[in-house]
Image: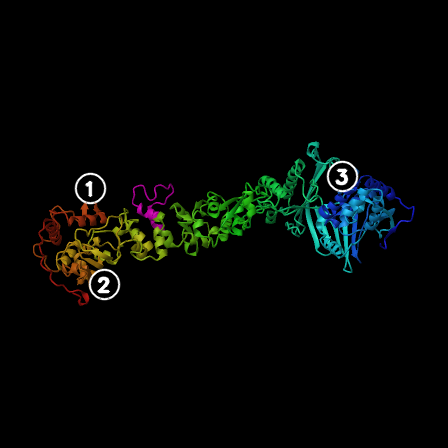
Amino acid sequence: MSMFVRPADEGADPFGTARLRRGVLDAWAASPARFREDANAEEDLVLGGYRDRLVVELAQNAADAAARAGVPGRLRLTLRDGVLVAANTGAPLDAAGVESLSTLRASAKRDDAERAVGRFGVGFAAVLAVTDEPAVVGRHGGVRWSLAEARGLAGDSAGGSAGLGDEIRRRDGHVPLLRLPFAAEGTAPDPYDTAVILPLRDAAAADLAERLLHAVDDALLLALPGLEEVVVEIGDAPPRTVRRGTDGALTVIEDSRDGTTRWRTVAAHGPLTPDLLADRPIEERLRPHWSVTWAVPVDSDGTPARPRTSPVVHAPTPSEEPLGVPALLIASFPLDSTRRHTAPGPLTDFLVERAADAYTELLADWRPVTTGIIDLVPGPLGRGELDGALRQTLLGRLPRTSFLPPAAEPDGRGEGDEGDGAGTESDLPETLRPRDAEVVEGAGADTVRVLAEVLPTLLPAGLERRAELRTLGVARLPLADAIDRLAGLEKSPDWWRRLYESLAGVDPDRLSGLPVPLADGRTTTGPRQVLLPGVEAARIDPETLARLGLKVAHPDAAHPLLEKLGALPATPRAVLTTPQVRAAVAASLDDEGALNWEDEAPDADELADTVLGLVRDAGLEPGDEPWLGALALPDEDGELSPACELVFPGGPFAQVMREGELAAVDAELARKWGEAPLAACGVLVDFVLVRATDVVLDPDELEPREGDFAEPDDAGLLDAVDVWSEDVLDRFPDSPVPPVATELVAVRDLDLVDDDQWPRALALLARPPLRDALTQPVRVLLPDGTHEVVRPYTAWWLRGHPVRGGGRAPPRGAAPRGPPPGAPSATTPIAGGKEHHRHPQAGRRVRRAGRHRCGDRVEGERHLRAARACDRVSGRRRRRPPPSTISMPGGAP
């Protein structure tokens, strides 16, 4: 039958096979039911539980033999010329082994339960799936089986038993082959101790054997600890060697075909209590031990990989229980009668708990900790009853197990953050529990790494969509909420800049609460109203700005992102227009001083110097920021007055103004800053234009606006503007809807010019841009939608006043020039003989209001205007004679 095995010589029967055959044949003849029972059992094994377990069972027997002998297990599987030979090292075949092979469900390994893998005594039946003449030979003899010879012996026994003959005929001559062993002679190839020789039945058997040999994988060596090497030879192809070794804590499987795989394993074992074995067969109760092993392949960097092995539970050899957990599970689960599925019961439940404990330990001890470990988390749905129970148990333990990788490196600080005192090894965890961990939504990897230095429960970025994290109950943290948690955090400016750099491109709406470190050491929430230092801000004293309540970002933290979020570059104009500076200017005349809610707020002189410096550096023109007119500046007597109520000493307007009308700004302050900054703050250096649009020509409404400063579009500041409005109204039919001047350009403060200085004043008015106020007609929109052109206000005012060398006489009906009896003059003597200047803005308001108080005595032209206002109230209208025409420089009428 083979070059390695032949029938033993007559009388040579070291294992007592003749005795075994005689006992079986006598039992069959005495009880055909016994024959039937043996035939059915063998057929069930061949066609059922062991139909494709040939290679696994051969390897298992080889591992047990090596374990009994205490030698490294080596197995060589050779398929050539229609014969499969399995040669192995280890304990040689003996009489007990032959008896075990020739019986069903009576393993010879029960006395070596702790080391042996085989436990049912039926595994050798797997060879019948491919052969009718198996043989086992070793150094001390051999045994063989033959279907033809067994059929002949059974037929001879049936001669004295009609019932046995009937059973054999029903089965078409098939008899329980393994029950009838024969002595054999042969040798195992060196250096092996035992060889199983299987002449293959037909081509189908050869195909099955070849397929099973190709299916050998790492799981075979991992499940059989007694086996260290498997060599597979198929035909003339180069042999394939699969060898197991160790590398530290890792198990290394070297496969000449598939390459080297490194496995991380965890094993647990222990005794079983009698209550767990109460429903198990007696043979299993004699093996009161359990074991569980998990194995996971790892990449070169220690990251878990997907196993290439079959995704089934190994008990310890492969079963048909599906396993969805991404690892190899080898455990001593009890199997049902098919040897394909686990048997339900307390032992299985117990082993599920122990398997969950071991898997949890595997994940908790995994190093290095990377995001790849998340691949080892099972999904929420099981693939079978056992897998479902295992998953449910695992998912009850894993949320409380610390194994997830934190986003922050646990071994130190972030780049550029030395000396912070945060982010050190002592306070950054190496792993996180899922119940404590959080995954940031909407943040990039760099952002999460920076945030994790202060929020140590964050997981790395890119895991938001991982279903495993949802299964574990990991919390979701929106980026905006993560930013809100940074409020009050004290970190170095470099750390903040790294955070801002990482947030580039993020939706600004998520970053409204982003903290900003300030130059004075504070941290503010939100970039709005924060000033960003830059080259243009070099001349601004940060300490002074801080005393004004301004928020100036620390230079080392300044980043373009802050400007996108509402921060302003600390240019002079930006600093000047902050609410804090505006509030300081508005409060600069208060008795308590500017910003009295700040203990160290700058005084009036310091505020004036700061504001004027900003105005100068910003290059402001008069009227650019009208509110600067409320800035308190010292006048010629050292008293504080609003800038808009002061004149520049020696300036063009001061040379033509009546003496005492307005106070001059302090001479030293004027020399220090010059005309331009002071003029931009409202100090009168030259005549000032009022530019207003859509002015409703209603004399009763043309009043100065209430406020602390003059606005450049306030037509109510113009002297006698209501009278000019009356003259315009006289040109058009009465209408309940007043006309509108679409644009009004006029010179204000003409009533402050000294009578003797009109030639000089007219020369000033004749220059651009003041000349436009004289020559540009005013377009008036009438209620019917048409437009008319009227004389500009400035030309009208000049025509009605003595502006040339004493000029013309007052109009008819006007009172003589000069102040009315009892009226205050420009200067009023006070105690001690010192003249006290009137508050200019208040003086203007008194004069404006005086035009409309009926019965007041006013001089000259103003008396006529007040009278006309009273006439309007009473329904009487009096027309004033047109003034005489006067000539302007340059010939303008």
* Label at residue 831: 1
Q: CA distance from mark 3 to mark 1?
A: 121 Å
Which residues lie in the magenta part? Answer: 582-610
Tag 2 secondary structure: helix
What residue is shown with label 3?
A: 114
Q: Is residue 733 above or below residue 96?
A: below
- Does the magenta-highlighted stretch encompass residue 600? yes
Q: CA distance from mark 2 to mark 1?
A: 46 Å
In terms of image quadrants, where is residue 342?
top right
The amino acid type, in three-letter code, at marker 1 is: Ala
Tag 3 secondary structure: loop
**Residue 20, how many percent across, how many down?**
85, 42
The residue mark sitting in front, 2 or 1, is 2
Q: Earlier in the sequence, mark 3 or mark 2?
A: 3
Q: Residue furthest bottom?
A: 891
**Residue 380, how many percent across, how many down?**
57, 44
- Observer able to see residue 383: yes
In terms of image quadrants, where is residue 398?
top right
Tag 1 secondary structure: helix
Q: Earlier in the sequence, mark 2 or mark 1?
A: 2
What residue is shown with label 2?
A: 772
Mark 3 touching mark 2, by CB under 8 A?
Answer: no
